[in-house]
Each structure stands twice: as C-alpha cells, then as structure tokens.
Amino acid sequence: MTFRCQQCGKCCSHMGELIRIEEKTGPMKFRIRFVVTGNEMDVIVDEDKQALFRNKELNASQPDACPLLRLEKNKQAVCTIHHTRPDLCRIYACFRLLVLGPDGDHGGRVKDGTRFFSTMNADLRKIWENEIEGVIIPDETAWENFVGGVFEQAGYRVVK
C-alpha cells in the first residue's frame, strides 16, 4: 500500500522542537536550524503558498508545530516549503513514535495506529527485540511512555 498524506498535520505538530527558523535571508527565503544537530539549511517558501505562510494563526495556537506549517481554511495542514523541505521531512510517513539518533538522523518509527517498529538500525532493532517487543501494557499512552523511555535511556530522542 502506498502512503498517501491525509494532511492532518500530526507529523509536524511537534517539529518546532526540532526545527527553528534562524534568520530570514530573502523575501520568502529562510535559514533553518535543526536543534538536535545544529545543522543549518536554506529553504524557500513555495510560490503558491506565500499568502498562506503569512498567516501566523497556527503558530499562536500550536507553538510546538513546525514554524513552516500552516492550515488552510478547510483545516488541511500544508508544508509551506514542500519543494525545499529537509530530508527528515521527505522520508516521513505517519508515525506514532519517531526515534532519532544522537545526531538527529531518522533512526526508526512506530507506525501510526500500531505497535510495529520499523528500523534499518541494528542497535535500535536489538533494543526493540530485547527490551520492548512482547511487553504487555494495555494502556496506549503508558505503552508509548514506556517505549519512549527505553529509547531515551539508550541515548535516542523520541518524538510523539
């Protein structure tokens, strides 16, 4: 099944913790910084989204959201820098928990609506198999907190 974005905005609702606008470098051009790694990159607001970008309503109501995310009138979430968005955003498909390595790179994720962990990282796979897989915690929030705690204890960052 091919992933199709539903434009719910959940993916970016906490990315403000990871992505910051450092400076405006042109009329619709910005230098952003990844908080975890300190890496910076230039992005440009897509031409067809410039009017939408000027609306700061979402930033006021959801301060943890990506500073480049906006909601259209129909409440669909839109990335205003879709054409120049970071690699982390490009590889995203809905997650329940996103596990980032110490350098801020994508490590793995628990898919939305599941307790299935997907990773190409052997160390993360081992942590999952030895400490998480098979643990019975009926409450979903408690389970997420447990999983997040295990990965964070091992030096990873977890985004819900």
Image (cartoon, rainbow, N blue to C red):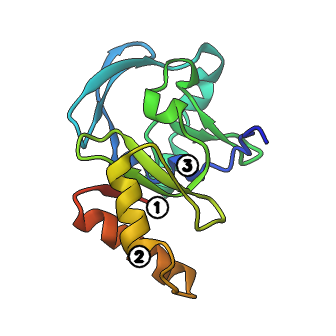
In this orientation, does residue 63 appear? Answer: no
User: Is the residue marked by circle 3 packed among few (<14), some (14-19), or many (20+) residues within 10 Å?
Assistant: many
Mark 3 secondary-structure assignment: helix
User: What percent of the width, then of the height, locates residue 53?
Assistant: 54, 30
Using the image as rendered, state which of residue 118 and residue 157 is in the foreground: 118
Residue with the mark numbered 2: 145
Mark 3 or 2 closer to N-term? 3
Q: Is residue 126 above or below residue 142?
A: above
Q: Is residue 69 above or below residue 49?
A: below
Q: Which mark is residue 160?
A: 1
Q: Are marks 1 and 3 in contact (CB under 8 Å)?
A: no
Residue with the mark numbered 3: 11
Amino acid on which disc 2 is placed: Asn
In this orientation, does residue 38 appear? Answer: yes
Using the image as rendered, state which of residue 30 and residue 87 is in the foreground: 87
User: What percent of the width, then of the height, locates residue 102?
Assistant: 23, 46
User: What percent of the width, then of the height, locates residue 23?
Assistant: 27, 24
Q: Is residue 4 above or below residue 147?
A: above
Quarter of image, res 51: top right
Amino acid on which disc 3 is placed: Cys
Residue plotted at (37% across, 73% down): 131
Q: Is the N terminus in the top left, top right, bottom left or bottom right quadrant?
A: top right
In screen coordinates, is 11 left or right of 3?
Answer: left
